[in-house]
């Protein structure tokens, strides 16, 4: 596998779970990125402070970003742009998401729309806000083709949104979440088609069942290499769309 390098990474929903672990592993790499941007709704909150304390010693910039607030997203983009100083953002990981309980009997319109707002509209708006920085990274890179070392958007999805290979309702009874991840997969596909000509790789990843607040008590180690295992565009699309088919 070709070596994966990137100078700047932004991870949303970085105060816990998969987002926090990705930030830790980014900072722990032999050659960490020059900039690691970590966002969450309230990085100054008591709960976030406790979780984020271990990563504050590295080259990480913490700032708020609320994926349902357009103004908050634009403000976050301005913070990152000021630090990057024209160098561009190599990798955007849209990880923030919610998974409230919902069944076909209990779910309301408000339940469905609130989950879609965070899990689908959020990644769409965040990507739009950071698109100029991703384009700058792609244009400045010496990498050929599509790769996470050049410029990439990674949307954290779930096999729960798979249409071709869905888990059972008994195993995964969260209807609004599953529908939102199916929509996120299509959003990612549209992004991939649109942004390919701009040199930006877009992919949706099912990270597996890992021990988080949204996961289970049967932990499976999550490694950064799983998220970025395929650095070439065609290979990464094959590996990821199996989960979102």
Image: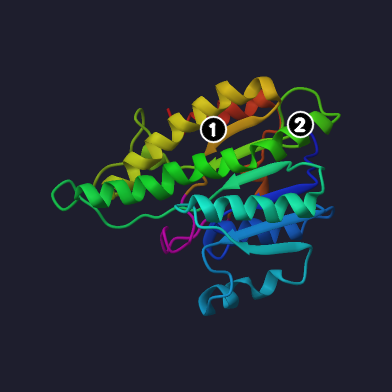
Query: Which residue is found at the position 42% from the left and 64% from the top?
Result: 217
Q: Is residue 1 visible to us here?
A: no
Q: Which mark is residue 138?
A: 2
Q: Which mark is residue 139?
A: none
Query: Which residue is found at the position 55% from the left and 45% from the top?
Result: 126
Q: Which residues are magenta?
A: 209-221
Q: Is residue 67 visible to us here?
A: yes
Q: Where residue 185 sits in the image (x, y, percent)? A: 45, 33
Query: Which residue is found at the position 51% from the left and 32% from the top?
Result: 188
Residue 85 relative to residue 74: left or right = right
> What residue is shown with label 1?
240
Q: Where residue 168 sits in the image (x, y, percent)? A: 27, 42
Residue 74 relative to residue 79: left or right = left
**Which quarter of the picture shows residue 15?**
bottom right
Name the one closer to the observer, 2 or 45: 45
The image shows residue 59, relative to residue 241, as above or below, that is below
């Amino acid at each position: 596998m070709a070596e994966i390098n990137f100078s700047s990474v932004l991870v949303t929903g970085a105060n816990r779970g998969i987002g926090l672990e990705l930030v830790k592993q980014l900072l722990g790499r032999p050659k960490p990125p020059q900039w690691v941007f970590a966002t969450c709704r309230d990085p100054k909150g008591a709960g976030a402070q406790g979780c984020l304390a271990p990563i504050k010693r590295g080259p990480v910039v913490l700032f708020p970003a609320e994926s349902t607030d357009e103004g908050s997203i634009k403000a976050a983009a301005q913070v990152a742009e000021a630090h990057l100083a024209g160098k561009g953002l190599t990798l955007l990981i849209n990880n923030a998401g919610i998974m409230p309980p919902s069944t076909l009997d209990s779910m309301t319109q408000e339940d469905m729309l609130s989950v879609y707002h965070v899990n689908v509209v959020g990644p769409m708006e965040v990507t739009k806000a950071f698109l100029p920085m991703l384009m700058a990274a792609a244009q400045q890179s010496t990498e050929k083709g599509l790769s996470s070392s050049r410029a990439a958007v990674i949307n954290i999805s779930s096999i729960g949104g798979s249409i071709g290979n869905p888990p059972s309702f008994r195993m995964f009874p969260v209807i609004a979440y599953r529908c939102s991840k199916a929509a996120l997969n299509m959003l990612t596909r549209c992004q991939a088609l649109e942004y390919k000509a701009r040199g930006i790789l877009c992919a949706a990843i099912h990270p597996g069942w890992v021990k988080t607040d949204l996961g289970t008590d049967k932990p499976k180690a999550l490694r950064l290499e799983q998220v970025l295992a395929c650095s070439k565009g065609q290979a990464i699309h094959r590996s990821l769309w199996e989960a979102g088919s």
